[in-house]
Image (cartoon, rainbow, N blue to C red):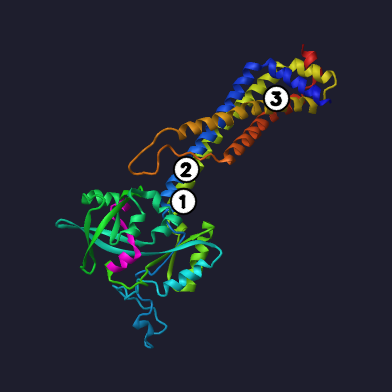
Amino acid sequence: MNSKLLLNVTGSLLLARMRQSIVAAAGVTFGIAMFITMQSFMTGLNKLLDGLVINRTPHIRLYNEVKPNDHQPVNESQKYKGSYNFIRSLKASNVRLSIYNSGYIMEAIKKDDRVAGVTPRITARAFFNNGVVDINGVINGIDADQESSLFHFTDYIVGGKVADLNNISNSIILGKALAETMLVSIDDVIQVITADGNRYPLKVVGFFQSGIRDIDKVQSFATIATTQKILGRPGNYITDIEIKLKNMDAAPAMAREYKKRYHTDAEDIQTANAQYETGSNVRLVISYSVAFTLLLVAGFGIYNILNMMIYEKMDSIAILKATGFSGNDVKNIFIAISVSIGIAGGLPGLLFGYLLATGINQIPFQTEALPTLKTYPVNHNPVFYIVGILFALLTTYLAGLFPARKAGRVDPVDIIRGK
């Protein structure tokens, strides 16, 4: 049958049921708009929450873990060789916390094409003297420039300048929660006490706020040279090597590779932050489920409308078939009606979804826990719009398929005889 004629008939049937068609299209519009809005907001929120940890976490960390020696004297004894030996209250051995030959290791890792960057770090336990009270904390000796380049360190500085860490000798950046506990301000001098009991004065040049208060209550940052000086260690003393990869998904395999090659312990980002990835996936599944449910509800609405249209248009269907329209022609007409409703509702849905997501992104949202956040987070990913319109077309097609097949099987003789 002529395609132009089929389109004319489709348009006539749509206009004859204009009110119901508009209601069905509005359901599709609402479903797609909510789908895009929810996905944009939920994935934006996921990126924000994951970024709080992932941005500050190396993809691979090389270090020496404090653990008991695997080679115990009883296991070397010929008398007990081949036996299962159980040792109680096994204590940690004299583990070397610093990484041996760290300079060579970092140079070798930098030459790996899979690596985006490498930076050293020193993690040292210390006490911050606050009058008669000593507050437990951690001093992180860092290369400030590399930390800012690889792990967005500058983004979390809420007072002072990162550059002062390098420009001012014997300086320190305190976690904001720790600074509030100690009631110190920028340019104040604090006393740091090492585990060996040595006291060292440091000038506060900035405040760090990660958004996780428990971390900010103990964290502080100094240059590697300053940290080595506080601990009384030589210039090659490094406890951690932090590695950022070009492909984060390769971290588990590369961590095992580096652990074996350099004889250190290695921790990958997936292992260190498994709970955050699980939470993100759960939130994503929930948002997809709710959004798809809205589109399915809209599809059922289209199904009901087309069913009613078929019952009301039995005479028209009989006339069409009696005048030469085949069953496939009639089926294609009603499928075209359904898909037209999907398109008519889907395109405005994309626009409204974008406008709603943009509107959410403009709502001010400021909290002391997240200093880098100014508005609600939104992720305008084009994939959401493609998935939304494709799912809308698929839903409306399936919603119209079954009524259309019923219309294609109508026998005009039965209808006319009944009349």
Q: CA distance from mark 1 to mark 3?
A: 43 Å
Percent x, y for residue 388? 59, 36
Q: Disc 1 or 3, which lies upstream in sequence?
A: 1
Percent x, y for residue 1? 84, 26
Q: Residues within 10 Å of mark 3 (few under 14, many from 20)?
A: many
Q: Residue furthest bottom?
A: 78
The quadrant the C terminus occupies is top right
Q: Which residues are magenta?
A: 214-229
Mark 1 and mark 2 residues within 8 Å of each other at the beta carbon: no
Q: Disc 2 or 3, which lies upstream in sequence?
A: 2
Give the structural element (helix, strand or loop) at label 1: helix
For the residue pair 177 and 187, the one nearer the viewer reads as 187
Percent x, y for residue 403? 69, 26
Q: Residues within 10 Å of mark 1 (few under 14, many from 20)?
A: some
Which numbered disc covers residue 277? 1
Which numbered disc covers residue 337? 3
Instruction: Name the residue that disc number 2 marks.
Output: 283
Mark 1 and mark 3 residues within 8 Å of each other at the beta carbon: no
Percent x, y for residue 381? 55, 41
Q: CA distance from mark 2 to mark 3?
A: 36 Å
